[in-house]
C-alpha cells in the first residue's frame, strides 16, 4: 500500500510517499531442497531517486520490526 510520511532533517521538512511491498523470501539460501518461505516487507521511497543517477540505498532492519524510514535514521540522512 501507499502512505505518506514526514521527516525533518535539520531545517528541512520532507513529505515522502512510502510504498510498501511484500514478497516471498526463502528461509534457507544454502539448501535448495528446502522450499520454506516467509513474507518479507520492503519499502520504496522515490522522492530523491533519479533513474539516471540514483541513488539506491538499501536499509535492512535486521531482526527488528521495520516500519519504514524515520527522520532519525542514517538512511534518511544520506538520502
Image (cartoon, rainbow, N blue to C red):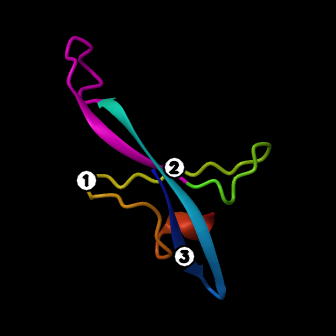
Q: Residue at x 51, y 49 (%)?
A: 58
Check disc 1 and report the residue beneath it: 63
Residue 29, image quadrant:
top left
Q: Position of residue 2 (x, y in %)?
A: 50, 54
Viewed as shown, does residue 55 lie left or right of 2? Answer: right
Q: Which residues are magenta?
A: 26-44
Nearer to us: label 2 or label 3: 3
Task: Residue at 47%, 64% (x, y): give it.
Answer: 69
Residue for badge 3: 7
Residue at 53% across, 63% down? 75
Q: Residue furthest top?
A: 33
Nearest to the observer: residue 1 or residue 49 = 1
Provide the residue designation for mark 2.
Answer: 58
Residues marked 2 and 1 touching at CB (< 8 Å):
no
Decide which of tag 2 and tag 3 comes sooner along the chain. 3
- The image shows residue 3 at horizontal and vertical percentages of 49, 60
Q: CA distance from mark 2 to mark 1?
A: 15 Å
* Residue 69 vertical placement versus 27 (above, below): below
**Local SS, label 2:** loop
- Could you tell me residue 18's position as x and y percent? 52, 58
Residue 18 or residue 73, whichever sits in front: 18
CA–CA distance in space, label 1 to label 3: 23 Å
Badge 3 crowding class, 10 Å Cα cut-off, few under 14, some 14 to 19, many 20 or more, is: some
**Badge 1 or badge 3: first in the primary sequence:** 3
Disc 2 or 1, which lies upstream in sequence? 2
Asked if the magenta segment contains residue 27, the reply would be yes
Amino acid at each position: 500500500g501507499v502512505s505518506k510520511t514526514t521527516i525533518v532533517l535539520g531545517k528541512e521538512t520532507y513529505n515522502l510517499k512510502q510504498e510498501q511491498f511484500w514478497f516471498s523470501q526463502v528461509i534457507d539460501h544454502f539448501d535448495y531442497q528446502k522450499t520454506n518461505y516467509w513474507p518479507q516487507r520492503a519499502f520504496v521511497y522515490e522522492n530523491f531517486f533519479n533513474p539516471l543517477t540514483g541513488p539506491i540505498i538499501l536499509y535492512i532492519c535486521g531482526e527488528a520490526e521495520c516500519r519504514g524510514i524515520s527522520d532519525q535514521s542514517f538512511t534518511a540522512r544520506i538520502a
